[in-house]
Structures are given as C-alpha cells and as structure tokens.
Image (tube, rainbow, N blue to C red):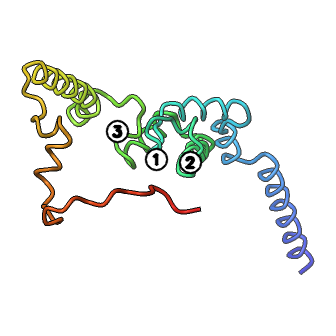
C-alpha cells in the first residue's frame, strides 16, 4: 500500500512539473502566439491611419474615415484598428470593408464595370451642365428667351389677375408697416 501511495505521489509530482513547465514556456500555443503577435502602439496607429485614409466616410462622402468625426466613421476606424490588432493584413481589412459596404467605401475605387458610374458620373454631369449653359446662351442670343409679358411686369399682371374692382380704382395705400 505504501508503494502505491509513493507511486501516486511521484506521478503527481511529474504531472505538476509538466504543468508548470508547459505553463511557463507556453508550449506550442505560446510559440504560435509569439510568432503572430499583432502590432500595437505607434505601429498599429500608423497602419490604422494609413488604411483609414483609403476608406470613404459613408455619411460625409467627401472625407475619409480618418478625417471625419461622424459616429459611423469613428466606428469604422475602430473596426479597422481592431482587425489590424488581431493580426489581419491591410488587404484583408480592405476586402472586408468592400464586401460589407461595396466599392463605394474605397476612396479610390477600382476601374471596372461596376464602378464606371463612380468614375464617369461627375464627367457626364459636368458635360451636361456645360451643354445646358451653351444651349441657354445660344437661345438667349437668338432672342428666343423669355416672352415679352415676362419682361414687362405690368403686362404680365394685367393679363394674369382678374378684374375684381368692377372698374373702380383701388384706394391708395396709406402705410406699408404697422402703426406705431
């Protein structure tokens, strides 16, 4: 019986030693974590700011999430920081944002069929505005602008308002404002 107890004590001591050594060393888990330690401090902030400068604020639309102070932009920047802190690459975070919000979230969307409206839309609006301006100036030069009734305010009002005074002149106005 004594021998059994001695064997149990030895076995307990061996298990405790192994437990302490694995805990202190970290075993294979500790090595894996040491090799993939996520960045922190200034390096993480620099990567976060660099990536946030490439992502558009979905509310402001003319600012990046790095520049915007809108609540959604702050949340997106926090999400970028958390993913980078977990060890995700910048490309993986960018792909996550595009998958979630579409190509519009990129401040410089890629040139492809789905983003042609983003690239060519402003050009078409500018050309349409210039075309409208040129058309208006050409019509104005031809003299086909506004009809005479709009150029002469008296004739426009005479024809537009019914004669409700029964031919009687209107009384003169005595005051335009409230009495003191």
In the image, what residue occupies the spot 36% across and 39% down? 104
- Answer above or below: position of 3 versus 35: below
Q: CA distance from mark 3 to mark 1?
A: 15 Å
Tell me where residue 119 sits by quadrant: top left
Residue 73 placement, left or right of 137: right
Q: Residues within 10 Å of mark 1 (few under 14, many from 20)?
A: few
Q: Which residue position holds label 1? A: 59
Give the image location of residue 1, x and y in percent.
89, 81
Residue 136: percent from left, percent from top: 15, 26
The mark closer to the camera, 3 or 2, is 2
Q: Which residue is mark 2?
A: 70
Question: Does 104 sit left or right of 33 as displayed?
Answer: left
Residue at the spot of label 3: 103
Residue 156 sits in which quadrant?
top left
As helix, strand or loop, the secondary structure at mark 1 comes to: loop
Q: Nearer the viewer, residue 4 or 126?
A: 126
Structural crowding at the residue carrying mark 2, measured as other residues with C-alpha within 10 Å and reported as few (<14), some (14–19) or many (≥20): few
Q: Residue at x 60, y 35 (%)?
A: 48
Residue farthest along the right direction in this orientation:
2
Image point (10%, 35%), residue name: 148
Q: Is residue 92 visible?
A: no
- Circles 3 and 2, Cβ within 8 Å, touching? The answer is no
Q: Quadrant of the C terminus?
A: bottom right
Residue at image location 13% in from the left, 62% down from the top: 167
Q: How far across and down, in percent of the image, does residue 129 sit?
A: 22, 27
- In space, the residues marked 3 and 2 are separated at their CA atoms by 20 Å
Q: Earlier in the sequence, mark 3 or mark 1?
A: 1
**Upstream in the sequence, badge 1 or badge 2?**
1
Q: Is residue 64 visible?
A: yes
């Amino acid at each position: 019986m004594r021998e059994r107890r001695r064997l149990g004590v030895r076995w307990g001591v061996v298990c405790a030693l192994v437990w302490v050594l694995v805990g202190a060393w970290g075993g294979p888990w500790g090595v894996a974590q040491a090799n993939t330690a996520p960045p922190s401090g200034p390096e993480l902030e620099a990567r976060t700011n660099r990536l946030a400068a490439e992502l558009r604020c979905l509310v402001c639309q003319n600012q990046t999430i790095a520049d915007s102070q809108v609540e959604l932009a702050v949340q997106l920047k926090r999400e970028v920081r958390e993913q980078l802190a977990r060890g995700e690459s910048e490309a993986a975070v960018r792909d996550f944002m595009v998958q979630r919000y579409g190509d519009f979230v990129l401040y410089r969307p890629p040139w492809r069929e789905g983003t042609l409206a983003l690239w060519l839309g402003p050009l078409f609006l500018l050309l349409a505005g210039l075309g409208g301006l040129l058309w208006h100036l050409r019509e104005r030069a031809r003299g086909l602008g506004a009809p005479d009734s709009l150029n002469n305010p008296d004739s426009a009002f005479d024809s537009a308002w019914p004669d409700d005074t029964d031919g009687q002149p209107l009384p003169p106005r005595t005051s335009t404002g409230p009495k003191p």
